[in-house]
Amino acid sequence: MVFNAKKRLSLAAGVALMLSGCSTTPLGPDVPASSTSPAAPPRSAPPAAAGAGAAPQDRNTPPPAPREFRAAWVSTVANIDWPSRSNLSVDKQKAEAIAILERARSLNLNAIVLQVRPSADAIYPSELEPWSEFLSGAQGRAPRPLYDPLQFWIEQAHARGLELHAWFNPYRARHATAKTPLVREHIANTQPETVKQYGRYLWMDPGEKAASQHTLKVILDVVKRYDIDGVHIDDYFYPYPIDAPNAAGAESAALDGGTSSRGELEFPDQPSWQRYLLDGGQLNRADWRRQNVNQLIEALYAGIHREKSWVRFGISPFGIGRPEKRPPGIVGFSQYDKLYADAELWLAKGWLDYLAPQLYWPVAQAPQAFDVLLDYWLAQNTRGRHVWPGLYTSRIDNSAKAFAPEEIVKQIGVTRSRAGSTGHVHFSVAALMDNRKGIVDQLKAASYQGPALVPATPWLGSEAPGAPAVALRREGGATALRLTAGGGKAATQFAVWSRYGSEWRFALTPAARPELLLADDASAGPPNAVVVSAVDRLGNESERVHLEAAKRN
C-alpha cells in the first residue's frame, strides 16, 4: 500500500446497528439502520456472474444473482483510515467503525479489508504481539475500557451483510511514523536477531526462519480465534529500497513508474545469508530472498485452509509484473527484483484464493496502463483464481497527479469487461468517507446501483446449503418475508428476487436478519412473485424457492 500522506476521515457520528425489519435498499450513512420503512429493491443490478449470459426470457425465472467483489481497504497504520487518531475514546472508535461500515453498505460494497497488524502489533488482544499505538496511543496499551476491536468489526460487518478480511503486514516491525517506545513483548526485544534497522523502519528479516514462523503463528492465531472471511497480506515483503545515505523512500518513485536514481541501501540480511551458504545453500542471493518469501506464502495458504477451509487467502502485490514477462510498452518498478515477490509464481502454484494487484495508474498512462496491466495479470492466472485489482481511489485529491472520479468509474468498467476479473478493491476508504469530488455519488449512479454477491470460490468447496423456507404476509403497504435457513451447510445470506409486473429486482439480507419488507411499487403495486435462495460463505447458492406473492395474504 502507499501511505504518502495521511488521509483523514469525515466520519458520521454513531449509527445504530441494523435490526431485522429493515428496508431492501441501503440507507444513507446518517440514517439509523433500524428504520422499518419498506422500500422496493433497486431496479438496476450489477453485472451477473461471468458467462451467465442475458436474463432468461421466461418471466417466471429471475436472472442469475449479480456477483462482484466490491471492497475497500481500511488502513490503521499512521491512522490513515481508522481510528482517525490514536487514543480516541472507545465510544468514538466504535462510532467511526460503524460510520465506515454504514458507508460501505449504503454504497453496495460487500467486503471490508481491515488492517489488523500494522507493524508486528495488533488491534486485537493477542498473546503474541502488543497492542498497536495507532489504536491506543502507546504500544502495549489496551483500549480503556477494554474491548476487542477486531471482534467488534467482525460482528458489525456481518450484521450488515459485509465480509471482513483481516489484513496483515507480514514483515514490517516498526513504522516510520511510530512515536512511542517498543515494549518488552515486541519481537524486536524478544527475538532481536530477527529484526533489522532499515532507514526509519524496523523490518523482520525474511531470511530468519524465526521471523517467518512468528508471522505464520500470528496469522493462524487470528484465523483460529476469529470468524473472519479472509486473510489478506499486502505488498511489503522485503522493504521498498531506500536511497543511501539519506534514507529517502523509493515507493513514490515506484508508483511513478520508475526507481530510485541513487545507490540503494542494501537490506542488512548478511547474517542470515551467510548462514544459508554455510548450510550448503546453492541459490544466488536474489533467488534465496524470493525463496524465503515463497515459503511463507505456501505455508500460509496451507495453514489457513487446514485451520478453516472456507477462509480465503488474498495477496495485494505491486501492480507491475516481472520485467521479462511484461507486455510491450509497460515499464516501471520491479517487485520481482526489489521486493523479491514472485507473484506470478504464486498464481501459477495456486497459493492464493484471490490476487488484488495494485493497479494505481490511469487507463491513459501508456507505460503503466490500467487495462493492459489487468490483462497481464489475467493472463498469468492459469489456475482460475479470483483477480480483483486494487484501485487508487485516494488519488482523487488536489495533487498535480490527481484522478478525476470518472477515472475510477472507468476502471470499474474495464474490470467488468474482462470475464476473468470479477471485482475490485478501493484504496482506501478515506476517499469514500469524504466523498471526494463526488466519487460516492458517481459510484452510486453509475457502478453500484444494486447489491451483489461475492463470487463463489468452488476450489475451496462447492456444496450448497439447503433451500430456505419462506413465509409471506402483507404488512401495511409492503410484503413481509420471513426466511428460515434449510438443513445442512450453514447459510450466511439470503438472495431475494421480487417481481413487479414483469420486472425482477434483487436484494440481499444477512441470514442473521431473516425478515425483509418489500415495498409496494407506486405503479406496479406489490410484488407478484418472490424467489429466495440461501448462500453460504463461499458463495454457493442453494436451490431457489418460488412463491407467488400475490396469492398470499
Image (spheres, rainbow, N blue to C red):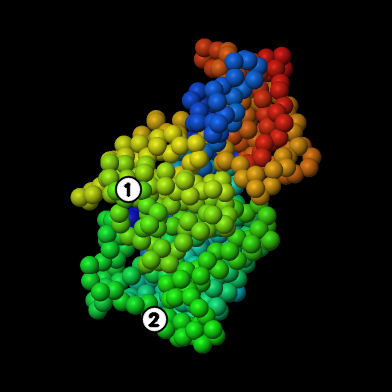
State the CA–CA distance, disc 2 to disc 1: 35 Å
Looking at the rendered structure, the number of numbered marks drawn on it comes to 2
Few, some or many C-alpha atoms within 10 Å of disc 1 (few <14, some 14-19, many ≥20)? few
Height in image: 324 above or below 242?
above
Camera-side residue: 63 or 149? 63
The residue labelled by disc 1 is: 328
Q: Amino acid at mark 2?
A: Pro
| Callout 1: SS | loop
Quadrant for the C terminus in the image: top right
> Which image quadrant for residue 417?
top left
Amino acid tagged 1: Pro
Identify the residue at horizontal 42%, vertical 81% (top origin).
269
Q: Position of residue 229 (x, y in %)?
A: 60, 52
Image: 246 above or below 157: below
408 to the left or right of 216:
left
Q: Kindly tell me whether residue 553 is visible in this rendering.
A: no
